[in-house]
C-alpha cells in the first residue's frame, strides 16, 4: 500500500567553503533562527526541522509556505535525493518526481536523443526508450524540431519537451513542484489534461505550490511549512482559513 | 524517478531512511550493484561527453591521436639519442608509455570532477552515484581507444611485434580499469568536499610524470630500478606496457600492482560506505 511516513525528519545543509572563523562568528552572533552550529562546528542551515506526518493512499497533499520554507527540500527528501540527518522516512510505492524536469537534458543532442537518454536515466532499456520517443515526441508537438539539437529550441519549446518527457510515467507516489503549472497558454490546456490524468492515477500526490487556486482544485490536504517546520496540517479549507 | 530495473517488492517500503539506523553498507552496496547493472546509462553519457567536447571539429577525438603521434615521433627521436638507445627499440616503448600515461593522467584529473560535474543530476534524481563515476571511467577509456591504432602503426613501422605474452594485456587492462573506477570514486568524493584537492592532484600528477618511467626506460636506473615497484604509477602502467613492449611483466610488479589496487579499493569503498549519504550535500 503506498504511503509516506515521516517521523521527526530533519535536514541540515552544511555551509561548506565558508572559511574564516570570524565570518562564522559574525553570522552566528546575529542569533539567526535557522543558522546554527552543529556538533562538528560547522555552520548549518536547518532546512527541515522535526517534521512528522503520515500520508496515506488517496491523499492529495499541497505543501504551501513562503519562499525558503522548505517545500522543495522536502520534495527532494521524499524523492530520495537528500538523506535526512535525523528522523525516519518511509516511502512505499513507485515514486515519480517532477521537480526539475530539465535536469539531465543534453543541450547538444536532438530532442529525440534526449528522450532516449531520459529513458535510460529512468532505467528503461534502449528499445523501450526508443519506443517512448514517439509517444513523447507526438505529445510535445515539436514536429520536425524533434530531430534538431535542443540548444536551438526556444524556451517554450524546451518546456514542452521537458514536460512531455517528465510526464510519461505512471507513478504511485507523485512528487511535483509548481514549476509544472507554468507554461505557454496554448500548450497549457493540453498539459493540464495530461497532468490531471497523472494526478488522478497516482495514489498519492505531494505538490509544492504558491497557487491557492491549484491547491483548492487538486488537493485534499494542505501542509503549511514555515522556516522548515510544519505550522499547519489539515484539510485544505481549514489550513487556508488560518492564513 | 520511474525505475524499471529495480525489483518491485509487493510488501514493504521501496525507500526507507532512518537516521538512527542508517544501513550505510547495504545502501552503498546497492548503489554499486544498481550502477553497474545499469552500465548502459554511463556508457551513453560518456559517448555524449566525447561528442559534445569535439562538436564541430573535423578530426574530433582523433586530434588526441594526432597530437600523441607527433609527441611519440618527436620524443622518440630526441630521447633515443639522449639516452643512446636505438630508435627501433625506443619508439614502441615511448608510444605505449605515452598512451598509457595520458590515460592515467586524464583519468586521475577527471576523477576530481566525477561527482561535482554531475551536480545538476545528483540534486534532482536519486541515481546511484556509481553511474557518475562510471561515466568518467568510460569517457577516458573511449578516448584512449582512439589512440590504439597508433600502437599498431608504430609496431608495423619498427617491425617489432609482441609474442604470446600479449595475452597478459587483458588482466593488465582489467586492473587499470578497476584502479580507474576506485580512484574516480575516492577522488570524486574527496574533491567534492574539499575543493583544494583538485589543484593538488594536478600538480602531483606532473611530478609523477617525471618520477615514473614514462619517457625513460626502467633499466636506465641501474641498481635503483629494484625500488621502482614502490611507485604505484609504475606498477599499474607496467601491467599494460610490459606485455606489449617488454616481453612480459615481472611477478613482483604484478604483486605490487594488485596490492595498490586493493588498497585504493578498500579506502574508496570505506569512504563510500561512510559518506555516501552526504554526497548530495557536498556537490
Image (cartoon, coloured by chain):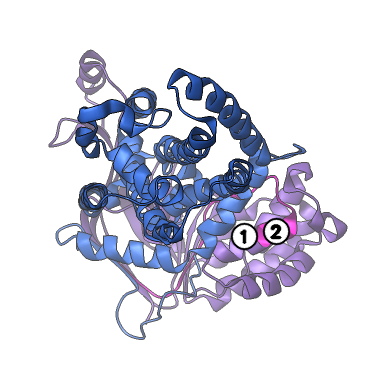
Chain colours: A purple, B blue
The quarter holding residue B204 reads top left
> Which one is nearer the viewer's eye here, B190 or A66?
B190
- The image's mark for residue A113 is 2
* Circle 1: element type: helix
Q: Is residue A190 magenta?
A: no
Residue shown at the point (37%, 29%) measured from the top left: B198
Look at 24% across and 32% down and name the residue there.
Answer: B225
- Where, quadrant-wise, is the C terminus of chain B in this rendering? top left
- The residue wearing badge 1 is A117
The reply, left or right, for residue B124 in relation to residue A30 is right
Furthest residue in direction top, as rendered: A22
Farthest-out residue, bottom: B10
In the image, residue A182 above or below residue B105 = below
Give residue B83's position: percent from left, percent from top: 42, 22
Which residue occupies 53% across, 61% down?
B41
Q: Percent position (x, y) of residue A237? A: 46, 62
Stretch of the chain drawn in magenta: A90-115
Residue B48 in the image: above or below residue A188: above
Label 2: element kind: helix
Q: Residue A215 has which mark? A: none
B207 and B38: which is toward the camera: B207
Q: Position of residue B77 (x, y in %)?
A: 56, 24
Amino acid at each position: 500500500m503506498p504511503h509516506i511516513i515521516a517521523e521527526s525528519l530533519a535536514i541540515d545543509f552544511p555551509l561548506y567553503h565558508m572559511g574564516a572563523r570570524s565570518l562564522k562568528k559574525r553570522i552566528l552572533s546575529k542569533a539567526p533562527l535557522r543558522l546554527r552550529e552543529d556538533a562538528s562546528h560547522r555552520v548549518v542551515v536547518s532546512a527541515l526541522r522535526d517534521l512528522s506526518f503520515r500520508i496515506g493512499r488517496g491523499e492529495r497533499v499541497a505543501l504551501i509556505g513562503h519562499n525558503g520554507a522548505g517545500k522543495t527540500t522536502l520534495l527532494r527528501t521524499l524523492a530520495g535525493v537528500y538523506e535526512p540527518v535525523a528522523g525516519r522516512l518511509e516511502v512505499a510505492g513507485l515514486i515519480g518526481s517532477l521537480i526539475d524536469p530539465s535536469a539531465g537534458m543534453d543541450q547538444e543532442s536532438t530532442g529525440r536523443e534526449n528522450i532516449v537518454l531520459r529513458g535510460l536515466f529512468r532505467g528503461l532499456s534502449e528499445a523501450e526508450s526508443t519506443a517512448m520517443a514517439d509517444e513523447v515526441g507526438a505529445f510535445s508537438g515539436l514536429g520536425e524540431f524533434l530531430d534538431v539539437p535542443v540548444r536551438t529550441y526556444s524556451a517554450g519549446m524546451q518546456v514542452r519537451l521537458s514536460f512531455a518527457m517528465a510526464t510519461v510515467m505512471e507513478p504511485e507516489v507523485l512528487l511535483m513542484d509548481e514549476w509544472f503549472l507554468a507554461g505557454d497558454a496554448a500548450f497549457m490546456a493540453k498539459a493540464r489534461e495530461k497532468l490531471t490524468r497523472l494526478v488522478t492515477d497516482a495514489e498519492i500526490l505531494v505538490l509544492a505550490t504558491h497557487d491557492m487556486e491549484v491547491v483548492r482544485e487538486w488537493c485534499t490536504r494542505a501542509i503549511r511549512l514555515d522556516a522548515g517546520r510544519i505550522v499547519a496540517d489539515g484539510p485544505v479549507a481549514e489550513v487556508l482559513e488560518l492564513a | 524517478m520511474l525505475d524499471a530495473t529495480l525489483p518491485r517488492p509487493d510488501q514493504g517500503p521501496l525507500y526507507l531512511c532512518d537516521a538512527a539506523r542508517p544501513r550505510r553498507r547495504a545502501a552503498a552496496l546497492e548503489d554499486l550493484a544498481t550502477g553497474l547493472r545499469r552500465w548502459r546509462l554511463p556508457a551513453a553519457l560518456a559517448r555524449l561527453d566525447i561528442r559534445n567536447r569535439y562538436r564541430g571539429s573535423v578530426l574530433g577525438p582523433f586530434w588526441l591521436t594526432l597530437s600523441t603521434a607527433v609527441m611519440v615521433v618527436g620524443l622518440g627521436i630526441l630521447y633515443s639519442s639522449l639516452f643512446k638507445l636505438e630508435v627501433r627499440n625506443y619508439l614502441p616503448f615511448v608510444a605505449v608509455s605515452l598512451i598509457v600515461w595520458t590515460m592515467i593522467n586524464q583519468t586521475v584529473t577527471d576523477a576530481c570532477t566525477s561527482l561535482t560535474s554531475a551536480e545538476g543530476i545528483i540534486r534532482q534524481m536519486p541515481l546511484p552515484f556509481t553511474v557518475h563515476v562510471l561515466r568518467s571511467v568510460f569517457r577516458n577509456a573511449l578516448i584512449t581507444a582512439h589512440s590504439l591504432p597508433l600502437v599498431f602503426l608504430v609496431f608495423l613501422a619498427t617491425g617489432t611485434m609482441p609474442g604470446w605474452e600479449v595475452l597478459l594485456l587483458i588482466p593488465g587492462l582489467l586492473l587499470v580499469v578497476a584502479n580507474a573506477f576506485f580512484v574516480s570514486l575516492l577522488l570524486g568524493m574527496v574533491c567534492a568536499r574539499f575543493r583544494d584537492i583538485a589543484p593538488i592532484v594536478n600538480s602531483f600528477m606532473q611530478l609523477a610524470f617525471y618520477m615514473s618511467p614514462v619517457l625513460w626506460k626502467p633499466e636506465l636506473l641501474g641498481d635503483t630500478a629494484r625500488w621502482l615497484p614502490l611507485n604505484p604509477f609504475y606498477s599499474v602502467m607496467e601491467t599494460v606496457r610490459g606485455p606489449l613492449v617488454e616481453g612480459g611483466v615481472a611477478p613482483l610488479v604484478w604483486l605490487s600492482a594488485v596490492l595498490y589496487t586493493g588498497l585504493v579499493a578498500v579506502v574508496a569503498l570505506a569512504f563510500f560506505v561512510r559518506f555516501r549519504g552526504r554526497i548530495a550535500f557536498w556537490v
